[in-house]
Image (cartoon, helix red, strand yellow):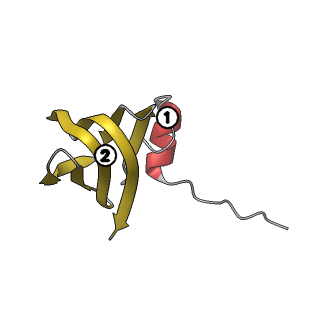
Amino acid sequence: MARKRRKIPLTKRLETALELPDGTLCRSFRIELSGNRRAVIEGCRRILQYDQNCIRLDTVEGALCFEGDCLRVNCLSGGSAVVAGQIATVGFEGE
């Protein structure tokens, strides 16, 4: 009996061939938190709301909301953003 091959998506094959972390080439965003003081977001398109208590970012999958005190965006370039300050909550509003 012939065994059916499961088709592996091109992005997954490229990630494997280039030894990239899983999810690098797919349509998603990534958050890296350093305690409650710093967040690096990859897959960010623009800033939707900006004040010292709330920062909302538009990502490839929806809006990402940071709430806290003394919040600021240290860097926004190349599809990445860095949010710094005292982060109390992180929320997601999917598309």
Q: Is residue 75 left or right of residue 31?
A: left
Q: Tag 2: Cα neighbours inside 10 Å, few (<14), some, or many (≥20)?
A: some
- Which three-letter amino acid code belongs to the residue tagged 2? Gly
User: Is residue 76 visible to us here?
Assistant: yes
Relative to 77, residue 7 above or below: below
Under circle 1, the secondary element is: loop
- Which three-letter amino acid code belongs to the residue tagged 1? Pro
User: Is residue 80 visible to us here?
Assistant: no
Q: Provide residue 95's location: percent of width, then percent of height.
A: 32, 71
- The dot on residue 21 is 1
Badges 2 and 1: C-beta atoms under 8 Å apart? Answer: no
Relative to 59, residue 73 above or below: above
Q: Provide residue 45's location: percent of width, then percent of height.
A: 19, 50
- Residue farthest toward the front in the current orientation of the protein: 69
- The dot on residue 5 is none
Q: Earlier in the sequence, mark 2 or mark 1?
A: 1
Q: Nearer the viewer, residue 2 or 36?
A: 36
Q: Provide residue 28's location: percent of width, then percent of height.
A: 38, 53
Residue at 33%, 61% in the rendered image: 61
Q: Which residue is mark 2?
A: 68
Q: Nearer the viewer, residue 45 or 57?
A: 57
Report the number of discs. 2
Q: Is residue 50 left or right of residue 93?
A: left
Residue at 56%, 54% in the rendered image: 8
Which of the 4 image quadrants contains residue 30? top left
Q: Nearer the viewer, residue 66 or 80?
A: 66
Q: Is residue 7 left or right of residue 1?
A: left
- Residue farthest toward the bottom in the current orientation of the protein: 95
Under circle 2, the secondary element is: strand
Q: Of discs 2 and 1, which sits in the foreground?
A: 2
